[in-house]
Image (cartoon, rainbow, N blue to C red):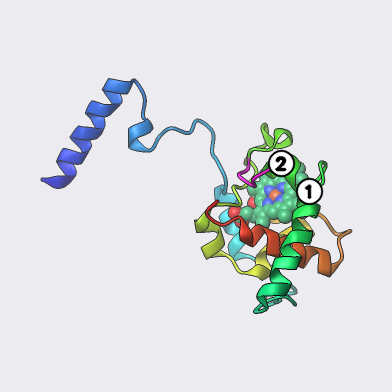
């Protein structure tokens, strides 16, 4: 009888708060990865698949790279504008996009993708996902790996 009682508790809470927050329906707009995004994750370009960070496996280098990547991320007209100061997908410039900018702190995202995917997405932007994300072909490989290192520090924040 457990499922029933959970459903019952949910219904009661919904009525009590005149909302669905307790039942996981608090978001009005789709937030973070949309179906198109997940498709992008599965379709990483062959030219990028398997690329590895030159900093991988070296904690000191990774930390220095993440520090440099943070500065790039926080350039006001770049990542931060859409993904927000903490990477949560709540940047002022991205509020009207559909899909919304991804929440880069989401552990599900981090567990689902490799560094090669993040590197690729920075290079090509929103094309694979049909989103408004800007492409950043102007960054050197080193700068892109610095951004990847920084994005990885956002997991669970
Ligand atoms: C113009 C707004 C915009 C800018 C600028 C932007 N993004 Fe995005 N980004 C998005 C949107 C919208 C999505 C969600 C849809 C998608 O996957 O394209 C996204 C998705 C992503 C994803 C894929 C997440 C996933 O769940 O698969 C990564 C990684 C990412 N952005 C990193 C960055 C980084 C790093 C920068 C800066 C170099 C940046 N973005 C700049 C809008 C932006």
CB of mark 2 near ligand 1 (< 8 Å): yes
Residue in the picture at 60% in, 61% down: 41
Residue 52 makes an appearance in the image = yes
Between marks 1 and 2 in the image, the one whose residue lies nearer the viewer: 2
Residue 34: x and y, percent?
56, 47
Which is more N-terminal, label 2 or label 1? 2
- Quarter residue 139 falls in: bottom right
| Magenta part of the chain | 85-89
Distance Cα–Cα, label 1 vs label 2: 10 Å
Residue in the picture at 57% in, 49% down: 33
Give left or right: position of 76 versus 52.
right
Assign the N terminus to one quadrant of the image. Answer: top left
**Magenta span includes 86:** yes
Residue in the picture at 85% in, 59% down: 137
Which residue, given by chain and number where applicable, does mark 2 sit on?
Answer: 82
Give left or right: position of 109 versus 26.
right
Residue 6: x and y, percent?
20, 40
Which residue, given by chain and number where applicable, does mark 1 sit on?
Answer: 134
- Secondary structure, mark 2, is helix
Residue furthest left in the image: 1
Residue 14: x and y, percent?
30, 26
Q: Nearer the viewer, residue 149 or 10?
A: 149
- Secondary structure, mark 1, is loop
Disc 1 + disc 2, Cβ < 8 Å: yes
**Magenta span includes 47:** no
Residue 147: x and y, percent?
74, 60
Give left or right: position of 94 versus 21.
right
CB of mark 1 near ligand 1 (< 8 Å): yes
């Amino acid at each position: 009888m457990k499922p029933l009682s959970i459903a019952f508790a949910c219904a009661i809470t919904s009525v009590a708060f005149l909302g669905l927050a307790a039942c996981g329906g608090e978001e009005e707009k789709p937030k973070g990865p949309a179906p198109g995004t997940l498709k992008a994750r599965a379709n990483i370009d062959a030219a990028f698949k398997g690329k590895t960070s030159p900093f991988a496996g070296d904690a000191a280098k990774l930390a220095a790279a993440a520090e440099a990547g943070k500065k790039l991320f926080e350039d006001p007209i770049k990542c931060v504008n859409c993904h927000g100061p903490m990477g949560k997908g709540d940047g002022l410039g991205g509020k009207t996009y559909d899909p919304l900018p991804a929440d880069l702190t989401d552990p599900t995202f981090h567990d689902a993708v490799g560094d090669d995917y993040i590197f690729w997405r920075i290079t090509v932007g929103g094309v694979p996902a049909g989103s408004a994300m800007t492409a950043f072909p102007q960054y050197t490989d080193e700068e892109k790996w610095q951004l990847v290192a920084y994005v990885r520090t956002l997991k669970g924040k």
